[in-house]
């Protein structure tokens, strides 16, 4: 009796821990478990129909799972998408497709390009408000022969046809520009100005979670002199959504 | 006599009433439970098949817990960077990786080293080409990596660790000699995962940029070899 009582918490503790993990039931004849998160890793275990696995975590399109017997292995997302939840409903797994390209929460990307004759490196992240409208923040560095500088900007982008494989987009925003003249020249002082931009471009869905993005922007630099500066920028890059 | 007539009439009325109940009047829609009863007795062979009885079972409410994604790697590395003309110097840096698919990953690195003295400075005595601050070599790279040869490494009989030989390339900036330079980086690396959350790296990369710190534009190759460790989040 005492032993049973003593053993009780020992039994219930792992059961409780396992309960917090997602339990999936194999509905196909079997589920293959690989030794690593990749298509080439050998299959050393199979889980039979009707048995369950606990999902420990996900890495890219692979899920680390634990079987009822306590054996751990990696299941492909595509295979795990054929399993069922405890209530019999199919387990929905997102792999990244054209539908998600149209409808996702976050995206990030990297660009190379040209800002007013200087080489441009830029990165951005965007959060979707609707499928069409996104809030974007970006950070760019341009490296020229005469001067270098940075631009930090925030803006709104409107994707005209988000469900299309290729969609045009337009954006507007504002930011902050810092220009540092080259050290090899006689040193005028660094300067910082506010900028505003308007741009147009397009996005092209490639595969899975990837897309390309190209854009042309016009920047207006609100300088302290009488005339504002207008600079053109083009950028081409890679992005992915999540 | 009167009682007999009354009994007869009553039985006629009763027979008519029971007959009415078994008849299918156009305004009579069978309820699921009474049609089931009719099917049991097999009263009307032309009637449509009875609907399947829905069992009154309460469905289990399954709360789908969020599956943790461990696609992000954060780490540090240390090694040697050969700064062209300025000697091979220790380099230290930070890395951030996002694994997009089993094949591809995006990487951001930031590293620092300090350039040594050139041969010219060493030979000509007290000449200083660059100030101390200008010798600071800092860089960042935005790269895309491809797991070219994924596999497993084995230590002894009982330990197998997943690994990958990857190719990596990208663009970035090198700040050296007081100037920013657009740089291209490319190389290869080896990643091994002793556990699911820890990765060890060996990397060799070339940081190439055009510099005019001596007045003419030159392509500078800066080879870097590092070892590092990172943690998956």
Image: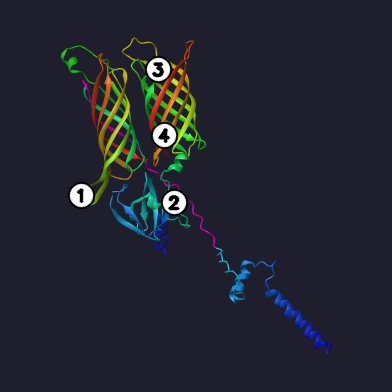
Chain letter for mark 3, please.
A
* Among numbered discs 4 and 3, the one appearing first in the sequence: 4
Percent position (x, y) of residue B46? 60, 72
Q: What element does badge 1 sit on?
A: loop
Q: Is residue A124 left or right of residue A37?
A: right
Direction front: furthest residue: B46
Q: Is residue B209 above or below residue B66?
A: above
Specify the segment rendered in magenta.
B57-86
Q: Earlier in the sequence, mark 4 or mark 2?
A: 2
Mark 1 to mark 3 CA distance (whole Å): 57 Å
- The image's mark for residue A179 is 3
Element under disc 3? strand
Q: Nearer the viewer, residue A72 or A186?
A: A186
Q: Which residue carries the number 2 mark?
A: A20
Q: Residues within 10 Å of mark 4 (few under 14, many from 20)?
A: some
Query: Viewer-nearest of labels 1 and 3?
Result: 3
Disc 1 designates what residue? B156
Q: Position of residue A168 (x, y in %)?
A: 46, 32
Residue B83 magenta-highlighted: yes
Task: Tell me which chain the residue with mark 2 is part of.
Answer: A
- Distance CA(mark 4)–CA(mark 2): 31 Å
Residue depicted at x 62% and y 76%: B43
Residue A217 place in picture, x, y as percent: 44, 24
Q: Residue furthest bottom?
A: B1
Quadrant location of the C terminus of chain B in the rendered image:
top left
Q: Which residue is mark 4?
A: A108
């Amino acid at each position: 009796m005492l032993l049973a009582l003593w053993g009780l918490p020992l039994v219930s503790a792992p059961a409780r821990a396992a309960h917090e993990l997602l339990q999936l039931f194999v509905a196909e004849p079997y589920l293959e478990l690989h030794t690593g998160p990749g298509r080439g890793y050998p299959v050393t275990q199979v889980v039979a129909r009707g048995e369950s696995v606990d999902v420990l975590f996900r890495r890219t399109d692979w899920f680390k799972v634990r079987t009822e017997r306590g054996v751990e292995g990696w299941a492909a997302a595509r295979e795990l998408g054929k399993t069922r939840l405890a209530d019999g409903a199919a387990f929905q797994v997102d792999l990244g497709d054209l539908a998600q390209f149209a409808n996702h929460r976050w995206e990030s990307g990297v660009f190379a390009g040209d800002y007013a004759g200087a080489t441009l490196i830029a990165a951005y992240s965007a959060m979707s408000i609707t499928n069409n409208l996104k809030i974007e923040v970006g950070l760019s560095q341009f490296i020229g022969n005469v001067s270098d500088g940075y631009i930090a900007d925030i803006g709104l982008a409107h994707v005209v046809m988000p469900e299309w494989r290729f969609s045009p987009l337009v954006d507007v925003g504002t930011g902050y520009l810092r220009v540092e003249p080259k050290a090899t020249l006689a040193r005028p002082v660094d300067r910082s100005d506010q900028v505003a931009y308007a741009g147009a471009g397009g996005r092209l869905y490639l595969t899975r979670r990837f897309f390309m993005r190209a854009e042309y922007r016009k920047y207006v630099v609100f300088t302290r002199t009488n005339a504002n500066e207008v600079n053109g920028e083009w950028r081409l890059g890679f992005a992915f959504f999540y | 006599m009167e009682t007999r007539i009354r009994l007869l009439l009553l039985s006629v009325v009763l027979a008519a009433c029971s007959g009415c109940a078994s008849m299918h009047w156009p305004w009579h829609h069978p309820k699921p439970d009474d049609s089931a009863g009719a099917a049991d007795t097999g009263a009307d062979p032309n009637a449509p098949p009875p609907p399947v009885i829905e069992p009154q079972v309460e469905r289990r409410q399954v709360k789908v817990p969020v599956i943790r994604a461990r696609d992000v790697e954060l780490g540090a590395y240390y090694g040697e960077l050969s700064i062209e003309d300025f000697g091979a110097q220790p380099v230290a840096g930070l890395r951030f990786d996002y694994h997009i698919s089993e094949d591809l990953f995006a990487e951001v690195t930031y590293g620092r080293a300090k350039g040594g003295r050139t041969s010219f400075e060493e030979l000509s005595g007290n000449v200083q080409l660059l100030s101390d601050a200008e010798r600071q070599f800092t860089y960042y790279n935005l790269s895309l990596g491809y797991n070219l040869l994924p596999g497993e490494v084995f230590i002894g009989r009982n330990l197998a660790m997943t690994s990958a030989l990857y190719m990596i390339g990208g663009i970035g900036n090198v700040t050296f000699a007081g100037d920013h330079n657009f740089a291209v980086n490319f190389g290869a690396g080896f990643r091994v995962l002793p556990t699911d959350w820890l990765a060890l790296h060996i990397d060799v990369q070339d940081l190439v940029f055009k510099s005019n710190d001596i007045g003419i534009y030159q392509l500078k190759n800066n080879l870097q070899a590092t070892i590092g460790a990172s943690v998956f989040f």
